Image (cartoon, rainbow, N blue to C red):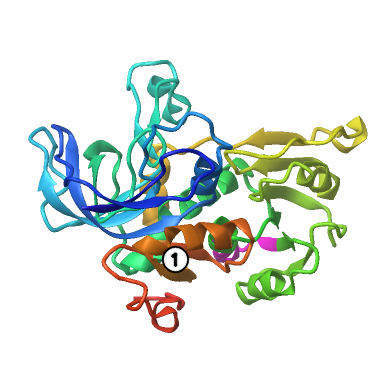
Amino acid sequence: MRAMVLEKAGEALRLSERPDPVPAAHQLLIEVCACAVCRTDLHVVDGDLTHPKLPLVPGHEIVGRVLEVGRSVQAGFKVGQRVGVPWLGFTCGTCSYCTSGQENLCDTAQFTGYQIDGGFATHTVADARYCFAIPDRYDDVHAAPLLCAGLIGYRALKAAGEARSVGIYGFGAAAHIVAQICRHQGRAIYAFTRDGDTAAQDFARDLGCTWAGSSLAAAPVPLDAALVFAPVGELVPLGLRALRKGGTLVLGGIHMSTIPAMPYDILWGERVVRSIANLTRKDGVDFMKLAAEVPLEIHSEPFALDEANIALDRLRAGQLTGAAVLVPSQTRKDVDPGQLAKRVGPA
């Protein structure tokens, strides 16, 4: 197998030849068809997340096909079936978190592309108990972002409750999916982008946002909730100022820069600040059912496997619209962005 490997935080990934992995009892051997590039991958590579397994194959938004089924895998996945592999790769199953519907908080959880080798490769193995079936509506390249951008956006929106006016700070891969879910549910969406990023603002309006503008601008209406996907601590007081009394600010990232000091009066009035950590398997099942019903337009830009560092650089520089997706079967000369970077509507 070929894989892009992180040897040391802060260094570029290295293309490596490795033996094909062998599935353990509960695992699937998977041929990777597509793996989206997430900001969490960037945090791992840059050293913002400090406990990766090294050397490491990053990537946790994996779509592939089952090549082999481990001997203890229960019914549900068969050879040849398409399967999705998310960030959550293992939990203990016995702690108080796992037994109370909060397995995403398990103290001994392991994560794909962090403690478990992930999908920046031609092949991977994954615990079948943490994999999902993928809706037929989406091809591989456009299904991959559902496995984290979609899932985390969905969990963040659930944390916002029944909010009717929702602000989104940072209009990237997760935001472009959750905005469409909001539109489907009849919510009004207000998109806040980097100051001067008119391309992202136009993109947001194209996806049905009621308003789009700079994150430095005042919200045009008091918001019931705001979702922050950009890893920028300075957005927390800005988001709080945009909320009505009783509103909820949801922080959707796994890492964020330092939150600045702020006056108590922007929190007072029973405003709530909460974070989202990881996902549960129930989130995955529920979200994939929703994605099968709603014709989400997933915007993906394809890259060959050996272009992983280029994709990470583009993400780091804020130069992507939608999600970057690695296609391991292709080489640089084979990738045709004009063909693959398109919208996906009803099947």
- In percent of width and height, residue 194 lies at 75, 61
Camera-nearest residue between 335 and 7: 7
Task: Work out whether residue 303 or residue 65 is closer to the camera in this orientation and state it.
Answer: 303
Rendered image quadrant of residue 24: top left
In the image, 330: left or right of 217?
left
67 or 271, which is in the foreground?
67
Task: Tell me residue 211's x, y (percent).
Answer: 75, 68
Residue 262 is one of the magenta-drawn residues: no
Q: Residue drawn 54% across and 42% down?
A: 10
- Residue in the picture at 58% in, 37% down: 48
Q: Which residue type does callout 1 highlight?
A: Val
Quickly name the residue at label 1: 294
Q: What residue range appears in magenta? A: 180-189
What residue appears at the point 39 percent right and 47 percent down from the top-left corner?
60
Residue 183 on the magenta segment: yes
Identify the secondary structure beneath mark 1: loop
Q: Position of residue 151 (x, y in %)?
A: 47, 49
